Amino acid sequence: MLWGYKRYFLVIVDGLLILISTQLAVWIRFDQLMDWVSIYKDAMILSSFMYVSILYIFDMYNIERIKNAPDMMIRIVASFILSGILLTFFFYFFPGGRFGRGVFFIQLSVSCLLVSTWRFLFAKLYRYTIVKKKLLIIGASKCAHYLADALDSDMSEYEIIGFLDDDPKKQGQQIGPSKVVGYLSQFNDIIDKIGKCTTVIAITQNRKYPMIRDILRARIKGITVMEMPNLFELITGRIPVKHIHDGWLLFSDGFSLLNKEFIQRIKRLIDVILSIFLIACIFPVVLIAALLIKLESKGPAIFIQKRMGKDERVFNLINLRSMHKNAEMNGPVWAAQNDSRMTKVGKWIRWFRIDELPQLWNILRGEMSFIGPRPERPEFTIMLEKKIRYYYLRHSVKPGITG
């Protein structure tokens, strides 16, 4: 099953569990079965959408997250707490299609319990249902090490059976769970011994003709051959920028989407509809957070900062202030994990990502989108473009909240 399908599977099961939790909530509250669909239809649709959306924002549809059970459970609980807060305010201002208080809190608790249990079981079962595919990696440089680290998990669908490299010093060298088992010239002989497998090319430069010839022969025999960036993106959802070559990027899929007008219009329409809906829902949360910020420290509750957007246009990013006033008196500084400049309220709103909620206004204004690379400050952008290859390509699309 492809990684993308697993994500859809998680969404579908989450939706079903939320429906089940609604039925259980009605049964627990009233001690009888009722026609809850007609009574709570609007509230059920809204709560389901909210739960799944916040789970998505907390990155709970990223399969990589199931590898770390404690982190996964914390994120799920935090998602439902935030969803409960948002829904409470929404039901207060729009009481026409809401749950009763008893049903709502039971549904919220049962949904959180069922989804947490389901994710835990999914992680356990997934480990036992994986059918490992044999993987032979061509190359034993940093690129190969980087891929081996990404595959070093009992959740991986691939089993590395060896590396090939022409450097005599690397022969027999241990890399992760396997080692260098031969030279590139021995490629076809090794393929004949181990049988059907997947081969990954982890050499980004200086690909010599004999190697290309041997790989073509293997493909004719039915051997699957992949580029390292393709496999890395498949298993992690990320592109290893340090380990791609110009040709791979030049002929990659996806560039055409940037110029398809109807796709961009649909994306913009979704951004506008969702941002208006969420602004209406989260306004009370932002208001309370702003009041707490003002009570704890001097200065404005709203913090505006210059960021680099699409086509390198600078715009004003709107955030709730999470640091003390004049935190950058000596100039721009990277934010640290346990930054001493952060206020007590700031730590909480950052953990729940409440400080980023005002960015919905940036989306409504067309400066950002829900999905896109995180916008960086112009001062840091200049620095990052010098250090990271292809960094400038981030500015070909609108920056996003979710990254």
Image (tube, rainbow, N blue to C red):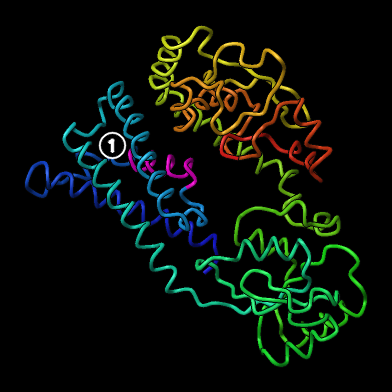
Provide the residue designation for mark 1. 43
x, y percent for residue 267: 60, 39
Nearer-the-camera pick, 273 or 48: 48
Answer above or below: position of 104 versus 135. Answer: above
x, y percent for residue 377: 71, 26
Q: Is residue 46 left or right of residue 136?
A: left
Answer above or below: position of 224 versus 156. Answer: below
Numbered disc total: 1
Q: Main secondary structure of the magenta part?
A: helix
Q: Where is residue 295, by image quadrant?
A: top left
Q: Where is residue 184, by image quadrant?
A: bottom right
| Magenta-drawn stretch contains 201 | no
Which residue is painted at 50% across and 12% down in the image?
A: 301
Which residue is painted at 47% across and 44% down in the image?
A: 56
Which residue is painted at 78% across and 84% down in the image?
A: 218
Under circle 1, the secondary element is helix
Answer above or below: position of 326 versus 78. Answer: above
Most distant residue in the top direction: 298
Hey, what amino acid is under mark 1? Ala
Magenta part of the chain = 47-59
Give the crowd class for mark 1: few <14, some 14-19, many >=20 residues within 10 Å.
Answer: many
